Amino acid sequence: MKYRIFGKTGLQISALGFGCMRLPIIGKDTSQIDEKKAMEMVHLAIDNGVNYFDTAYPYHTMDFSKGGSSEPFLAKALKNGYRGNIHIATKLPSWLIQSRKDMDRYIDEQLKRLDTGYIDFYLLHGLKRSEWDKLVRHDVFEFLDSAIRAGIIRYAGFSFHDDVTLFKEVVDAYNWTFCQIQYNYFDEHFQAGREGLEYAAERDLAVVIMEPLRGGSLVNNLPGEARQIFRETAPERSEVEWALRWLWNQPGISVVLSGMTKLEQVTENLELAENVSEAPWTEKDEDAIKKARRIINQLQRVNCTTCGYCMPCPEGVNIPRNLALSNDHHIFNDQNASYRYRVILTDPERASSCIQCGQCEEKCPQHIPIQIELQHVADLFES
């Protein structure tokens, strides 16, 4: 496993981080982690040198207003000596904070859920303008300072979902150790983007990358023309390798998080982290990425990473699945998308059940006009 110095901490952190957001589940209930499979995945990663594990209060829940099963599962997985070999990163649920006392209450709850006396890396989760202004009003800096003094968190950071102007404001507002941004070869200039990455790195912040495969779309949903470009350039590489290699060969990136669902994905990512994280990136490689990016830009309709922040819908609409089916149709001209819409989704889950309340748009980190897009999906598949 390749390691990198994690900003000003001086810590050696694995170039590959394990994201505990998309663990294997039982059936269709995202709150029911298949613990046997997930445990095997986590232990394989640790045994092969992965030492950065990212989770959050709501991961693996059907309702982001409640604690999910990701944190308690990770506590179980780190028994029998594993905790001492890794660093835990988890997050304050920013959207649930209504007072300074809430911050203490949630971190105390998270310490119990994780069954640990301290959290290595603690982030303000999913910062957007509304959450940021609210947290500042409620003395979030005093909260972080007091938690660090008490030893219950070691390093403070934030994850981010807004424009680069706000990103710079947040970076300059506090003595952060690290930040987490969405970044991949398709989203190079999206949200904080490359400009934000370079701004943070110049200030000695470690930068953690989320959505390196864009919710899997840079692998599962990659257009055939883009795949062909990659095959012609380097036929031995997988789509996963293209995406991760692009990231690992950029300065300023400390950790690339991968939200793995299968043991095979862990095995593949471990091999890539060991063998290609320091491999040279050529002009020919970069040119192939640019060509693939242009193709995706032309075909994709909705900028959705299936993060699930828009859920739950009060009417039961499965927003991420509807938008994914729309993209399948537009990117691939997938004739089976309409069939899957009718067969896989129940009546309440379909786009036509949307009552245009707008709650989902307030929570969407990608700022997607979800109401418009759901109407498009309904027109597309139900006309």
Image: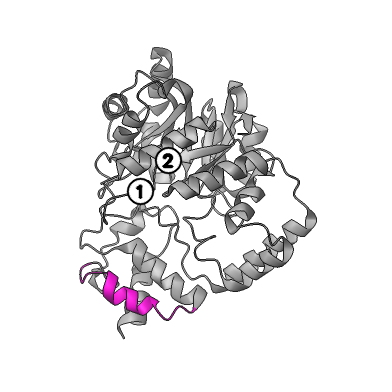
211 to the left or right of 188: left
On residue 24, which mark appears? 1
Helix, strand or loop under label 1 = loop
Q: Earlier in the sequence, mark 1 or mark 2?
A: 1
Which image quarter holds the C terminus? Answer: bottom left
User: Could you tell me which residue is drawn at 32 percent across and 58 percent down?
Assistant: 360
Which image quarter holds the N terminus? Answer: top right
What amino acid type should be assigned to the residue bearing mark 2?
Met
120 above or below 344?
above
Marker count (numbered)? 2
Residue 255 placement (x, y as % from top left): 57, 37
User: Could you tell me which residue is drawn at 54 percent across and 51 percent down?
Assistant: 191
**Hey, which quadrant is residue 152 in on the image?**
top left
Mark 2: few/some/many CA within 10 Å (<14, 14-19, 20+):
many
For disc 2, the marked residue is 41
> Closest to the observer: 160 or 250?
250
Residue 175 placement (x, y as % from top left): 54, 25
What amino acid type should be assigned to the residue bearing mark 1?
Pro
